[in-house]
């Protein structure tokens, strides 16, 4: 998963970002098409 606010890479089952600078937002998107 990718954080939409700070673009950090997170593990695939993440529900929140682990970075503090974006306030642990839940604005995540999957990392492009995984085959």
Image (cartoon, rainbow, N blue to C red):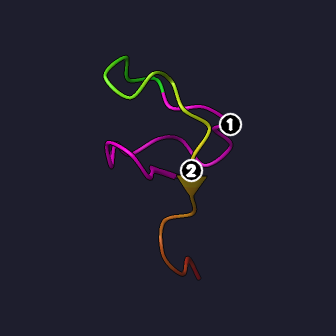
Q: Where residue 6 is drawn, which disc sits there?
A: none
Q: Residue at x 38, y 29 (%)?
A: 22
Q: Is residue 31 above or below residue 20?
A: below
**Residue labelled with disc 1:** 15
Return the x and y of residue 18 as percentages of the image width and height. Answer: 46, 23
- Element type where label 1 sits in the image: loop
Mark 2: secondary structure: strand
Furthest residue in direction top, as rendered: 20
Question: What is the x, y in percent for residue 12?
Answer: 60, 49
Q: Is residue 5 left or right of residue 13?
A: left
**Magenta-colored span:** 1-17
Report the residue marked by disc 2: 28
Residue at 68% across / 43% down in the picture?
13
Q: Nearer the viewer, residue 13 or 23?
A: 23
Labels 1 and 2 touching (C-beta < 8 A): yes
* Residue located at (38% from left, 45% from top): 5
Seen in the picture, residue 21 relative to 16 is either above or below; the reply is above
Q: Is residue 30 left or right of residue 5?
A: right
How far apart in space, not on screen, are marks 1 and 2 (Cα)? Answer: 7 Å
Residue 24: image location, x then y, percent: 51, 24
Depicted 26 relative to depicted 29: above or below: above
Up the image or down, 29 lies above or below 22; here it is: below
Q: How many marks?
A: 2
**Where is residue 2 drawn, in percent x and y?**
45, 52
Residue 26 falls within the magenta-colored stretch = no
Image quadrant in which the C terminus is located: bottom right
């Amino acid at each position: 998963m990718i954080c939409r606010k700070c673009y950090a890479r997170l593990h695939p089952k993440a529900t929140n970002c682990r970075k503090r600078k974006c306030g642990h937002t839940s604005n995540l998107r999957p990392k492009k098409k995984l085959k």
